[in-house]
Amino acid sequence: MIPDATISDKLPGDQPEASPPRAAQSLQGLPEITIANIRECVLTGPQLTTLVVAKRPRLLDEWLCRGDLGFIFAPRGVGKTWISMALPHAVSAGLALGHWTQGEEKARVLYLDGEMPLELSKARHTSLKQEGGDVAYLHHDMLFEKIGRTLNIAEVTHQEAITALLLETGRNFLVLDNLSCLASGVDENKGLAYEPIAAWLLELRRRKITVIMVHHAGREGFMRGHSKREDAASWIIELRDAKEEGQEGARFISHFAKPSRNTGRAIPDLLWHFTTDPEKGRTEIHCEPAEESEYGTMLRHIADGVETVTDLADLMGKQKGTISRWVKKGCNSGRLKKTGQLITLAAP
């Protein structure tokens, strides 16, 4: 049983009151670990072999199951929030999403938004919502307007408040958008600093609550921060920018940087294109198997040793101006390095 939990109302600079350590705070009301009670939890090999364990239902395709902890990451502006909002809308309505097939059961979603303006969240929710879906929002703008506070998922009391809200409302699917905005004061590059969050996410998994964490890519293209957070992940999806010159909306490729534990097969890369009709206020989602984009082809040629804009333009049959724009895009994202006329991949 979880104790009553509220968001702290202390102001910055207030002297903290004496309190038990974090671990003790999160275990209030639970039995002590003793030889007597853990003895009852031990399974012998034969007992485990014959134990009847309920199969976790699929929520979407073969790769997303109830109780998963997954990450979606990408550089800024690629489309993280589009796919992170579209996915729970599909799951809560029991629908397919693109080439990802319909799951076995629906989920009731709580979307915790720590960054986007409420106006844009409303517009995107309205443009994506599905008949029969059940997505609720705990939005940073609304929270600040109502109580003058923001959430910090690195704080035990805030974790307990969110867990209590999920249990109280029967919501079993949590989206955290995004880690940088929702976890204040956590050094992303230190694994030890992430442990209080990791322990909470594991608790949610044991409660059969599915969690998707949205995060940013670093300059080298990998998920930003310490790799420790990847250990408990059921899967990790990377979004790769595939937007060409002059295209509207968000266009990207979904790639499983960490394959799903739930399936023995590789999940194919998919090319997504989200476009919104401003008059109808409806977002259309186009999805197809991904082929290498021209920008991706350029990166491959650079990896193979082609070093100048002129050589790339000749090889690909493109104008130098087009190649120069792609190189600038690669340099801005940290994937490329340009020294004089020479272009190389940035060091990892």
Image (cartoon, rainbow, N blue to C red):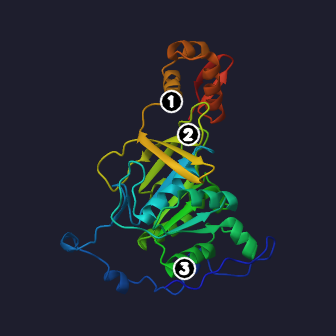
Q: CA distance from mark 1 to mark 3?
A: 45 Å
- Give the amino acid type for the residue marked by disc 3 in the picture: Ala
Which of the pair 151/282 is nearer the observer?
Answer: 282
Decide if residue 334 is in sight here: yes
Give the residue number, with chain letter if any, for mark 2: 221
Give the residue number, with chain letter if any, for mark 1: 296
Query: Element type at marker 3?
Result: helix
Query: Element type at marker 2?
Result: loop
Q: Position of residue 54 (x, y in %)?
A: 28, 71
Nearer mark to the viewer, of 2 and 3: 3
Q: CA distance from mark 2 to mark 1?
A: 13 Å
Query: On screen, 226 above or below 298?
Result: below
- Given contact means CB atoms under 8 Å apart, are the residues at marks 2 and 1 in contact? no
Give the residue number, with chain letter if any, for mark 3: 164
* Mark closer to the chain start, 2 or 1: 2
- Given contact means CB atoms under 8 Å apart, are the residues at marks 2 and 3 in contact? no
Q: Quadrant of the C terminus?
A: top right
Count of marks overlaid on the render: 3
* Mark closer to the chain start, 2 or 3: 3
Q: Position of residue 247 (x, y in %)?
A: 59, 35
* Mark closer to the chain start, 1 or 3: 3
Question: Callout 2: 10 Å neighbours few (<14), some, many (20+)?
Answer: some
- Give the amino acid type for the residue marked by disc 2 in the picture: Gly
Question: Callout 1: 10 Å neighbours few (<14), some, many (20+)?
Answer: some
